[in-house]
Image (cartoon, grey):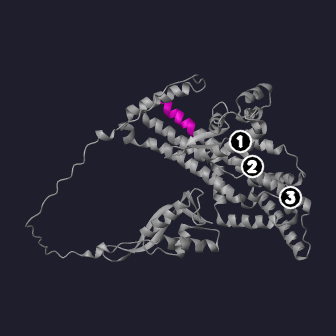
């Protein structure tokens, strides 16, 4: 971006981050949203919870500054901050719910991060950043070297350096980092960890922008449906094959490795136990920052999957033909809405009449009419000669979910996480498909950040795993059943 007068003047008028910093309510907005979203790594918050937090903040400010300081209600402020002319919050509704949800926009998180960086730091390190720059340049140079001879020479040089370092260590020469170098590198780690959490919102925002372009193309399309479907599938592939899509997929594959997570946990515990790091008084969430990365990445992954699912719904030929007239009307409304997006009409657009109550007086209700009871007389019941097997009435399968929950808990005592496939290899299914469905119900109860008796469950829809178990067919022969489903991971 060019730093010129015209560019900066345009940003000052249109960019939400600049509007936030220039707003009179900036201290209230930034402090509340930092405490509600950024500090606890909260990706989505319901309108009721966020309004309650804002109402408490407004009550405290009115006690200090007077009742005229912030006269409006909390929900009015939230709707104002989510309006297009502000753009500090994203207001949306989850599928199947009628309660509004709020999330930060990437611009707001950038503004809050800039305000956090204004604080004075007792220690400013530069060595770690210089080493990081050299390491990045070395990776780029080694990763783009196509000459095998030069690549082998570089690898041999690194091997000689490692051999020399091993020899010095065996001889007792083990150089250690001093406290200054440790603090420098730890501050660099904290900064990169916070920036990585902020990047997830921007990646998710860019995915939504790509999805919005596809929907605009659908709304304004006037050609054949086959050509439109080709365009949609091309855009769908563009979302996953874009630079951000490939980078996010590589990050997700790296972080989903249980070995990497255990290594991160061990190294964090080791580093946070150092006396030099304890003096810095790091944030408590630093110990579980990799879990925050996992939750933020999972939220972004679910958003991308939801966008893809919404695009696939358009491919239903039958629904398209049955609702063609409705779609034409909706496309007309969308086309007019897009045309008016830059110049929204002022004042009231439409009025909705007040709902009327249906009044039913007690005397208008009909009297009770007893039903006619048939009278049976001289009826003899004759038993048939068919031999009916009643054993099937008692041959019912009851799955003990408490036992399955204890199986998962015992497995998590030995390791921080385990996939459903690994769990069933150690504890095979005894009741077949019914028991597998019960495991999935336990995973669903602990999905999306909810906890079930200390258990959490994550679903990686990008990886599909086979689950096999032994059963018997109608003839009584032993057979092997198989079900394929997305990877389910139980965690503590």
Which numbered disc, 2 or 1, marks the residue closer to the eye? Answer: 1
Task: Give yes or no for contact between labels 3 and 2 (Cβ–Cβ under 8 Å).
Answer: no
Q: Which mark is residue 103?
A: none
Q: Read off the magenta span.
A: 211-222
Mainly helix, strand or loop, the magenta region?
helix
Q: Position of residue 275 (x, y in %)?
A: 87, 65
Q: Secondary structure at mark 2?
A: helix
Task: Determine whether 445 is above or below 469 in the image.
Answer: above
The residue closer to the viewer here, 88 or 210, is: 88
Asked if residue 212 lies in the magenta stretch, the reply is yes
Q: Quadrant of residue 69?
A: top right
Q: Residues within 10 Å of mark 2 (few under 14, many from 20)?
A: some
Extreme-left residue of the structure: 378
Which numbered disc, 1 or 3, marks the residue closer to the eye? Answer: 1
Q: Disc 2 marks which residue?
A: 195
Q: Disc 1 marks which residue?
A: 59
Extreme-front residue of the structure: 363
Q: Quadrant of residue 148?
A: bottom right
The residue closer to the viewer here, 96 or 306, is: 96
Q: Residues within 10 Å of mark 1 (few under 14, many from 20)?
A: few
The residue closer to the viewer here, 323 or 173, is: 323
Q: Position of residue 76 (x, y in %)?
A: 63, 35
Q: Disc 3 marks which residue?
A: 280
Asked if residue 417 lies in the magenta stretch, the reply is no
Query: In percent of the image, x 52 and y 64: which residue is there?
Result: 442
Which numbered disc, 3 or 2, marks the residue closer to the eye? Answer: 3
Q: Position of residue 349 (x, y in %)?
A: 52, 24
Relative side of 483 to 66, left or right: left
């Amino acid at each position: 971006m060019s730093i010129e007068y015209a560019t900066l003047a345009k940003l000052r008028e249109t960019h939400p981050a600049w509007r936030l910093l220039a707003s009179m309510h900036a201290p209230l907005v930034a402090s509340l949203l930092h405490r509600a979203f950024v500090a606890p790594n909260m990706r989505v918050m319901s309108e009721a919870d966020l309004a309650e937090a804002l109402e408490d903040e407004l009550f405290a400010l009115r006690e200090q500054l007077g009742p005229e300081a912030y006269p409006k209600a909390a929900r009015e402020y939230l709707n104002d901050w989510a309006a297009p002319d502000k753009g500090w919050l994203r207001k949306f509704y989850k599928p199947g719910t009628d309660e509004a949800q709020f999330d930060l926009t990437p611009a707001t998180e950038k503004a809050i991060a800039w305000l956090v960086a204004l604080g004075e730091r007792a220690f400013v390190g530069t060595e770690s950043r210089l080493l990081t720059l050299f390491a990045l340049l070395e990776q780029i140079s080694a990763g783009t070297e196509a000459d095998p001879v030069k690549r082998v020479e570089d690898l041999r040089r690194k091997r000689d350096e490692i051999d020399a370092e091993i020899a010095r260590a065996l001889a007792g020469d083990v150089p250690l980092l001093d406290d200054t170098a440790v603090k420098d590198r730890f501050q660099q780690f904290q900064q990169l960890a916070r920036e990585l959490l902020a990047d997830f919102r921007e990646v998710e925002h860019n995915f939504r922008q790509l999805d919005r372009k596809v929907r605009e193309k659908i709304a304004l399309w006037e050609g054949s449906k086959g050509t439109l479907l080709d365009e949609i599938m091309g855009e769908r592939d563009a979302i996953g094959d874009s630079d951000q899509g490939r980078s996010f997929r590589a990050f997700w594959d790296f972080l989903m490795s249980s070995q990497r997570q255990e290594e991160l946990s061990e190294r964090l515990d080791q580093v946070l136990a150092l006396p030099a790091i304890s003096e810095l008084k790091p944030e408590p969430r630093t110990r579980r920052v990799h879990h925050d990365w996992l939750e933020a990445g999972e939220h972004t992954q679910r958003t991308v999957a939801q966008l893809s699912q919404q695009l696939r719904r358009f491919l239903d030929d039958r629904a398209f033909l049955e609702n063609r007239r409705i779609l034409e009307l909706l496309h007309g409304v969308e086309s007019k809405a897009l045309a008016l997006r830059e110049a929204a009409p002022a004042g009231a657009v439409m009025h909705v009449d007040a709902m009327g109550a249906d009044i039913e007086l007690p005397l208008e209700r009909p009297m009770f009419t007893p039903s006619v009871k048939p009278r049976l007389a001289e009826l003899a019941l004759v038993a048939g000669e068919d031999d009916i097997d009643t054993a099937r009435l008692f041959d019912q399968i009851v799955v003990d979910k408490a036992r399955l929950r204890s199986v998962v808990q015992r497995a998590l005592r030995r390791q921080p996480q385990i996939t459903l496939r690994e769990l069933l290899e150690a504890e095979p299914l005894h009741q077949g498909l019914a028991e597998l469905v019960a495991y999935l119900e336990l995973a669903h109860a602990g999905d999306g950040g909810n906890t079930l008796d200390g258990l959490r469950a994550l679903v990686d829809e990008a990886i599909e795993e086979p689950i096999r178990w032994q059963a018997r067919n109608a003839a009584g022969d032993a057979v092997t059943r198989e079900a394929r489903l997305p990877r389910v991971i139980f965690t503590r």
